[in-house]
Image (tube, helix red, strand yellow):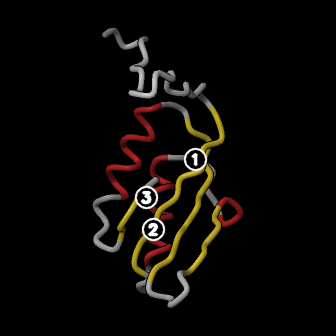
Amino acid sequence: MTSDETSTPASGQEAPKITFPCRYPVKVMGEAVDGFEQQVLEIFRRHAAGVDDEQVMARPSAKGNYIALTITIEATGIEQLERLFADLKTLSAVRLVL
């Protein structure tokens, strides 16, 4: 398969293609510990220019043990997203990155 081809899921549908640059929301779920949001934002700012508080939506879990952050960035390519996701997963409080 060449790098221009898209694999076909088992359902027979073609995977959606993303055209870069684009606005891209990333959801990070983790433990609601002190400094979690700041650590996540520091990583985002390393990988995506112009991330500020206006692009961040935070939602705590019902019991307050976890927090879901949705941060929308200007994605420039798949490599950028892969590096961002890998760095986010190095944080011990992170449970899921979507």
Label 1: few (<14), some (14–19) or many (≥20) C-alpha neighbours in 10 Å: few
The answer to which of marks 1 and 2 sits earlier in the sequence is 2
Q: Amino acid at mark 1?
A: Ala
- Mark number displayed over residue 49: 1
In the rendered image, residue 93, in percent from the top left (x then y), is placed at 34, 74
Q: Amino acid at mark 3?
A: Ile
**For residue 2, side relative to residue 29 (left or right):** left
Residue 4 lies, with reference to residue 80, above or below; the image says above
Residue 3, quarter of the rendered image: top left
Residue 98 versus residue 84: which sits nearer the camera? 98
**Alpha carbon separation for disc pair 1 and 2:** 22 Å
The answer to which of marks 3 and 2 sits earlier in the sequence is 2
Q: Which residue is mark 3?
A: 43
Q: Nearer the viewer, mark 3 or mark 2?
A: 2
Image point 41% across, 12% down: which residue? 5
The answer to which of marks 1 and 3 sits earlier in the sequence is 3
Residue 33, quarter of the rendered image: bottom left
In the rendered image, residue 44, in percent from the top left (x then y), is placed at 49, 55
For this orientation, the residue located farthest to the front is: 11
- Mark number displayed over residue 29: 2
| Kind of element beneath mark 1 | loop
